[in-house]
Amino acid sequence: MPVSSLNALKNSAKVFGKYLDQPALVEKLYNAMPVVLTGTAAGYGVYDTFKAKPEERKKRAVKNASVLGFTVASALLATRGLKIKGKEIFEGIIELPQKDEQGLKEILTKPFASKLSDKARGFVERVQEDKVLKFGEVKELMKEFKEKFKDEKLISKVIPEPESEAPFADLLKLSWLGLIPVLGGIAGGVVGDKLTKDDWKKHFPDKVKEGTYQYLNNIALCNVGAGLGALTMNAFDVKSKTARFAAMMTGVLGVGLVAGNAIANFVGKNVINPIFDKDKKAEHKSVKNMFKNLNSERHPEALDVSLHLDDVASVGFVSGLKWIGPVLPMLYSVSAYRAGIGYRNGKEK
């Protein structure tokens, strides 16, 4: 690729990054998520219901409505918190970024304001009014700062830089954000079984095991890996965002993707199974048996691997890309749904 094309690509990526960083845009995405998540869940519920045999559709519809309803409600509550009559019952996990009032004021006063074009000044005033700039407008504003002030970084006074001052606190938040929908999905599955007069106690162990598998393999252990990557970068005082992102993703791949399945299935086999099946307690008498046939009930498949897309999003969020926060409940809801239906793909049930 020619150098000029490569530079143009890098510049476009930089502009796109700033475009996504706009607090007003993140807030719009945050406000749209309830409709998007509910609509997506309803669409999948209808699809999955009509995929079933005609005689099974009524029961499938009830179960899907229960699992997906609880999943969506718990994911949104975890993200946004709960207010009743203006009183906050509990706070949401995702916090929205705030615009830099002081930075905007500086740009709109001397010496900056006198050198800005009327068009550029209008862009800044729109940001001050919580309006979202278009991609081309952000590009034009960045270009003017670079050409007139020889300082492209002035854009950060208009659109704040993505920052995360407490990555470990953010990882803990994400772990809670993933756990709450999984628990909601399991609760929805139990309610669905009761409504369709299925023996919920019979199906409950599979829901707990699948919920544990989903949470450990696809959420919690990946956050542990990202945390180890961040801890390593802190130990060596590495400040580069690219290097920190790469280190956290390496941790995710090592702990979550590679070891996650084995750890999740080990917990399911040796901790959860004995709780629900007394015959399984005998397997603890031999260390060899504790590691034998770990994948007999649940082996990893393509969707499990693709679910690690949320790990890339999580690392981006921890790195300071706050626009990712409102999207995370949708990614975690897939794990919650699978927990709710007690999905198992092995030969043993």
Image (spheres, rainbow, N blue to C red):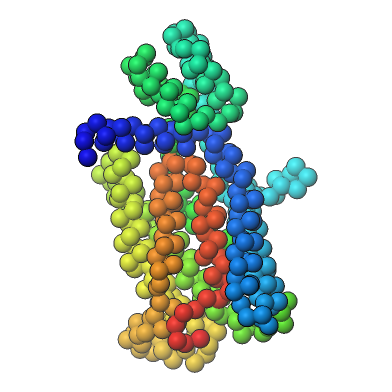
Q: Position of residue 88 (x, y in %)?
A: 70, 45
Residue 51 image-quadrant placement: bottom right
Of the 4 image quadrants, the one containing the N terminus is top left
Q: Residue drawn at (29%, 39%), measured in percent from left and top?
A: 240
Q: Is residue 18 visible?
A: yes
Which sits in the foreground, 212 or 152? 152
Q: Position of residue 104 (x, y in %)?
A: 51, 20
Position of residue 201 relative to residue 340, above or below, is below
Residue 27 image-quadrant placement: top right
The number of numbered badges drawn on the structure is 0
Position of residue 112 relative to residue 22, above or below, is above
Q: Is residue 185 visible?
A: no
Which sits in the foreground, 77 or 283? 77
Farthest residue, direction left: 2
Q: Position of residue 220 (x, y in %)?
A: 45, 61
Position of residue 83 relative to residue 343, above or below, is above
Position of residue 164 relative to residue 300, above or below, is above
Q: Position of residue 226 (x, y in %)?
A: 37, 54
Left or right side of 83 for 153: left
Q: Residue drawn at (68%, 68%), measured in percent from left and top?
A: 66
Q: Residue drawn at (40%, 69%), measured in percent from left and top?
A: 302
Left or right side of 38 for 230: left
